[in-house]
Amino acid sequence: MPNDLYTTRSKFNTSDYPDESNTLARKKGYSDIDFSLLYHPYDRDIRPLRDDRAIRNSLKNMLNTDTFERPFQPRLGTNLRGLLFEPMDTLTELNIEDGIRSSLSKETRVSILKVEADGDEDSNLYNITIKFKIKENNRIETLPVVLRRLR
């Protein structure tokens, strides 16, 4: 009887039924500081962002950073502020999309699936939608960003 039980169990492939403990063991656990600086009501300490929210925050920081703005990392960031003062046309939208793709390609935790920039001339802003996949857990997320020129 034990032989039948052993052969029955050996027919199952472990990759067909992923164990949750294996997934948790492989997870790295990213953390980042939240720039809204909200604090925990009991600890009176700043709440850090964890995992997927930390990655989203990192992507937003890369979009808000211009090139040559970070010391010792001059190639990180995009030049979105400079593109806001260009004429609002299709060529500028393509430049924004290419700049976002090239800067976010340096983020090793995600793979960029789709970047769309739509200019709204009446409101004088760009609606940007970034669709990306987190490599660690294969989760697909969407990050909406609004670029607005302030006068």
Image (cartoon, grey):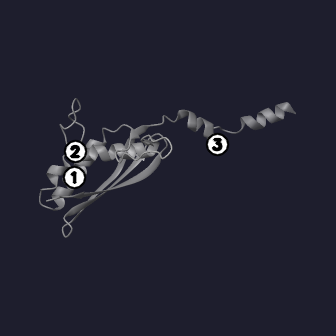
Does residue 129 sit above or below 123 in this rendering?
above
Residue 120 position, x and y percent, is 22, 66
- Residue kind at label 3, given as amino acid type: Tyr
State the residue position of label 1: 96
Locate residue 151 relative to residue 58 in the image: left or right: left
Q: Secondary structure at mark 3?
A: loop
Q: What's the residue at 63%, 42% (across, down)? A: 16
Which mark is first along the chain, 3 or 1?
3
What amino acid does circle 1 point to?
Ile
**Pick the front one: 116 or 66:** 66
Query: Marks 1 and 3: CB-CB under 8 Å?
Result: no
Quadrant assignment, res 109: top left
* Mark 2: amino acid: Thr
Q: Please name the residue that numbered disc 3 is placed on.
A: 17
Circle 3 residues within 10 Å: few <14, some 14–19, many ≥20: few
Q: CA distance from mark 2 to mark 1?
A: 9 Å
Q: Earlier in the sequence, mark 3 or mark 2?
A: 3
Which residue corresponds to mark 2?
Answer: 78
Where does residue 78 sit, x and y in percent of width and height? 22, 44
Label 1 SS: helix
**Disc 2 secondary structure class:** loop
Going from N to C along the chain, the mark reached first, 2 or 1, is 2
Circles 2 and 1: CB atoms closer than 8 Å:
no
Front of the two marks 2 and 1: 2
Q: CA distance from mark 3 to mark 2?
A: 42 Å
From the image, which quarter does the N terminus lie in?
top right
How far apart marks 1 and 3 lie (CA) works out to 42 Å
Percent of width and height locating residue 129: 32, 57
Quarter of the image where one finds residue 122: bottom left
